[in-house]
Image: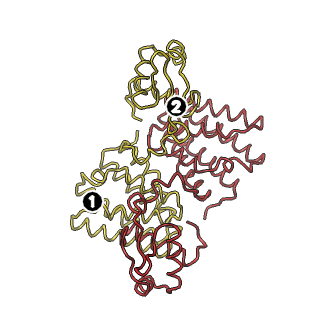
Chain colours: A red, B yellow
């Protein structure tokens, strides 16, 4: 969801929440008529019509000729709304980096506490391999992902371990590492070294903070700042 | 993943990582023979055999009679390992709460900053409704989820918004709110009030901290402490 939405988009959003969160309208339900619903939402009928059109396009509502507007019988909409789509969706790249910012420092924290020697070895292996690729100016997409996945694995939290590839898959590979100038590369080298050092020392807070810095560097590289 | 694993389970884990992270063995690949692989992993052949058996059970490896041990041709294993399974998996309840501990305070943080008035209204609506149910001693599972989902929606981060129901779905409803004594209920009432107050004041750090306390209270209620 972005800001700068039109009023109709906001209303569409609101109706969607009435279905998915409030369960006010269930799949198969008929929506109240235009007068009633636009009155309830305190919007014009034109805006309501536009919002309905948006939701029809998104397969949430359907208009049955001469009958009215219905919530589609679409299981995904209700209980598992979004479940199946998490991997298919093309989310905003900023949303994903925000997710990484929340998520990955904590992975580093738990990895520092829980990694077995073997897992630590694997993390360092990829960290060093990535360092070598950066210095040679070669593509490091695969190794970068292996580095972060090894950290996720070392948290010993199965849910985090499985969520990680989803986030990475959603970030388009091309986007992940493109647009990198020398400064960004230097930051990456430095950040990775710090992460590895803290992990080796089993310093959970250090590893967490170094990882946070690493993600912030990446976000700033894209021009993303906190709103 | 749990601690207290047998050696064979750890080795199975390690071989799985060689497939999913290291891509050392790809789907369809034949594993090195027992002598070679057990030597490389510095384990006995008996342990290796046990680890292979575990991975066969989990559909990762297959033994072809008279030919050797192969990595199964299973797309889920490689690129999107775990993707499809995130919703089906029955993860450790502690893993899930750890995930909530990472995730939900940040949701509250962003919601305090970004919620529209309407979204804030929805959050407060469910918060108050839940309060009433707690005081009446009635079931509040649905309303509890709606409360937390409304907060996720107000982050305006589509990825978080979609991840939220996955986490909640994985937490068995019965488990989520069972075993609650008076003390826990009092904590919940108090925590929810704080969360709502901070959100209303648009105090992001306050909302984050109150939510963190709320999840910690829930974890302690289950007897989960940091390792």
Badge number at residue A207: none
Task: Decide which of A209, B121 is in the foreground and name it.
Answer: B121
Q: Mark 1 — residue? A: B185
Q: Position of residue B4 (x, y in %)?
A: 37, 29
Letter of the chain that mark 2 sits on in the rendering: B
Q: Residue furthest front?
A: A65
Q: Position of residue B138 (x, y in %)?
A: 22, 64
Can you see residue A112? no
Query: For the residues carrying marks 1 and 2, which lies nearer the camera in this image?
Result: 2
Q: Secondary structure at mark 2?
A: helix
Letter of the chain that mark 1 sits on in the rendering: B
- Which residue lies at the image location 59% right of the left edge and 27% below the top edge? B24
Q: Secondary structure at mark 1?
A: helix
Q: Is residue B225 left or right of residue B41?
A: left
Q: Is residue B165 left or right of residue A226?
A: left
Q: Position of residue B37 (x, y in %)?
A: 52, 17
Q: Position of residue A105 (x, y in %)?
A: 55, 46
Q: Mark 2 — residue? A: B17
- Which residue lies at the image location 53% right of the left edge and 85% below the top edge? A46
A216 shown above or below B8: below
Q: Is residue A78 left or right of residue A108?
A: left
Task: Decide which of B124, A153 is in the foreground and name it.
Answer: A153
How many angstroms separate mark 1 from mark 2 (CA)?
Answer: 42 Å
């Amino acid at each position: 969801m972005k800001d700068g939405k039109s009023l109709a988009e906001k209303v569409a959003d609101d109706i969607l929440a009435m279905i998915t969160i409030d369960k006010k309208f269930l799949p198969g339900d008929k929506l109240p008529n235009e007068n009633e619903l636009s009155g309830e939402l305190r919007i014009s009928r034109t805006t309501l019509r536009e919002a309905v059109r948006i939701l029809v396009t998104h397969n949430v509502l359907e208009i049955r000729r001469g009958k009215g507007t219905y919530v589609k019988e679409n299981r995904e909409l209700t209980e598992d709304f979004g479940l199946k789509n998490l991997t298919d969706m093309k989310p905003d790249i900023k949303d994903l980096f925000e997710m990484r910012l929340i998520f990955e420092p904590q992975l580093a924290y738990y990895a520092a506490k829980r990694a077995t020697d073997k897992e630590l070895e694997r993390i360092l292996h990829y960290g060093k391999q990535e360092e070598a690729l950066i210095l040679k100016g070669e593509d490091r997409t695969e190794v970068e992902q292996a580095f972060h996945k090894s950290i996720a694995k070392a948290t010993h939290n199965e849910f985090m371990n499985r969520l990680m590839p989803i986030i990475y898959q959603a970030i388009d590979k091309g986007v992940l590492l493109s647009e990198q100038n020398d400064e960004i590369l230097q930051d990456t080298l430095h950040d990775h070294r710090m992460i590895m050092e803290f992990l080796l020392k089993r310093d959970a807070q250090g590893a967490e903070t170094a990882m946070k810095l690493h993600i912030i560097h990446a976000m700033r590289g894209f021009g993303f700042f906190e709103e």
